[in-house]
Image (tube, rainbow, N blue to C red):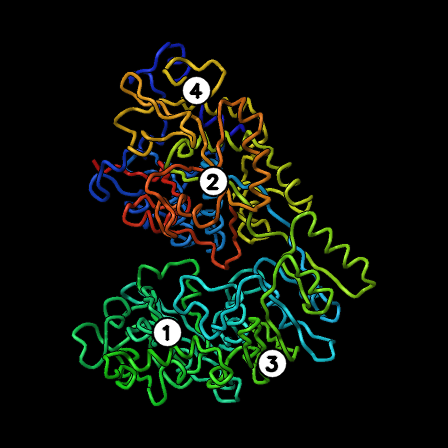
Amino acid sequence: MKKLMALLMTVVMAFSVVGALADVDAANIVESPEFDVMTLGNYKYGEDYESLYEKVGKDITIADVHEDEETGFGYITVDGEEKLLGLDFLTMAMVYNTTPAGDYETEDDVYAAWWRLYITRWNYLLPEVPLYSNEYYDLYNAQIKGVQEYPTNPFWSPASALIDWSSEKADDSFILGNTTELSGQFRYATFGKSSPAASDNDVEGLTTGLETVSTTKEGGFEWNSTVVDSHEEKLNEDGSLTYTIKIKDDLKFSDGSPVTAKDYLAFSMAMDSPVGTEASGRELNAQTVVGWKGAYQKYTGPDSAEGTKYFAGLHLIDDYTFSVTIEADYANYFYKISYGGFSANYAAAWLGEGVEIKDDGEGCYLSDEFYAKDADGKYIQAAKIRKLCTDTSAENYAAYPWSGPYYVESFDNSDATATLKKNEYFKGNYEGAQPKIGTVIYKKIVSATQMTAFTSGELDVIAGITGGADTDEALKTADESEGKYVYTHYSRAGYGKLGFRADYGPAQFASVRQAIALCMDRAQFAKDFTGGYGGVVDGPYYTGSWMYKAAVEQGMLLDSYATSADAAIDVLEADGWVYNADGTDYTGEGVRYKAIPADKINENDKNYKSVDGAYKTEEVNGVYLMPLVINWYGTADNPFTDLLQTGLKANENVAKAGMVVYNTIGDFGPMLDELYQAAVYGFYAGSPMYCAFNFATGFNSAAYDYAFNMTIDPAMYDDYSQYYIKDYADICWLK
């Protein structure tokens, strides 16, 4: 709490002067830094204000940053003025400003420094409260060998890890499953969707491979030396970046046919075109590649009035060599190696028989046959792509070969079970590992009956077991099996959380979010919820990640928000939660109120009230008094929601701090609509009510990238916001 209280000292001093006044009025309101954020709706972005990163960020290096030893916050000097770095600035700099400078010798060192500053700032603003981080256990049939030598982790699921395993079962099989329904859409799991089912995604990963850039077991990216013969990186005069990639000449598809450079370009050229858009009903976003937006993406065929057939950012150099050029705006991206990532997809499957990829020097283009239309003016190839992606017949799966360690033999629609066979021609993954298990069966499972299915031999693994009772059962099953079953375990890269709509109601004030954390015993909550198989973290990170370890080595210190009602009260009082509903001084009983000037508050906050209407924002002496009431929405049939009834709602520290928590329990879709304050799922009624929600989040992507997710730009805010938070430190006033 030392850091937190030091930051609030100046506000506390201001409060000590005005706190003795009997009635609230505009002259004695304790200013909150969030007041500036609340007024942004009255101003125009780009004219009256912009983000600090937009103004100066692209020219800043890590050497320009100086840190406050007490708080760990980062600052830069702009026009002679010291500027605190906010969440938007730090998340952008973290992935776009990683050129080595000062004492930081590598891009990784710089990234870790920005990441540390971001986590420190996040830990102070606390846009969500982490409440538990599980241990996960995977329970296996002991006839599956190699699981302990080559275990899973948050970045490496059983579907990825099984390439290192073998089966001693009589039929040389491995049966795994997922609670999500398989659709049979395995060539391209995201086809026509905003996000794929986890099960379909797993099968796609098993059957599509020979990628040029691989995601590693450790959650990083690296060039796949099994596939790539050589690669070159060139920064061009216009600031764009070109990767030239030569693949090896001995790669083969599952039918033994050769893999060439065209097989790495075909999928992108097909799906990034209007033909692909018509096929899937969704426009892919290849805006990082030169020549896509406004050019290739708009070319509709030989008679097109817009765009060009040339995809200027893609070049076919020879049978085994191609290049991709990235727009200058993305050339400094920390994870830019991922732009060089292409997988082998049989060209004729996506382009159609007889369609050629050509390159006369201006970029790749497709022969005119690709754009042929039927009598109704629809693309003929669009229908073929749709069939390729959605037809679940064995004939369709066999129509074209596969490039991964396995190929799809069949899919049973009646029980949603996919049967995959080993690809004998697969050269290996990025470590050179080749599949050993002959048959992989992937099926839909039901959580309630999966243990019975496992012990009866219908499954060979139950992955991601967590929670006290379930983990106890799994360990007991293994320990009493006389060697028939084994298990592995790893820490979760993510956590269950109390999230906030951090631009609405009391939760928009950092002091309130901090007070909630201080009132809760997070360590005990985690112990109770996980049954002792888990703990709690103090920010959005995975302790096993490389950047966390590097940041700790650099000296990162975070506030753990040790349980203390007195500390919560101090934080609230320092931020002006010092009134009763009538504007008189709060004396320690009932609900606290905060005074907000009339020129700062918006209509939603003027109308803020408890779910039952017992408490509401009141107008007194020309100012508005907001009640310290948290309207929390929890999902039904959820043990996490159940535990929050005592851990949060009925928590005596919450009452002692002058706060009241109301909750509503319902389904996940309506909860998300309340979070989004929009009828995405058709449930939002049009008036905001809730500012707190419980759900979970994960950090198991190889790219830890929140660029644009903390934006204060209203043009991007609704679509990109991660927590609906606008950090006041990111505001740069222009007038």
Disc 3 or disc 1, which is closer to the eye? 3
Element assignment for label 1: helix
Q: CA distance from mark 3 to mark 1?
A: 26 Å
The amino acid beneath tag 2 is Tyr
The numbered mark at residue 268 is 1
Q: Residue at x 38, y 85 (%)?
A: 318
The amino acid beneath tag 4 is Val
Q: CA distance from mark 3 to mark 2?
A: 47 Å
Percent from the top left, x then y, of residue 123?
A: 49, 38
Identify the mark nearer the N-term, 1 or 4: 4
Q: Residue at x 59, y 69 (%)?
A: 443
Q: Which residue is mark 3?
A: 422
Q: Are marks 4 and 3 in contact (CB under 8 Å)?
A: no
Determine crowd level at label 2: few under 14, some 14-19, many 20+ residues with C-alpha closer than 10 A: many
Give the quarter of the image for residue 375.
bottom left
Q: Residue at x 54, y 41 (%)?
A: 130
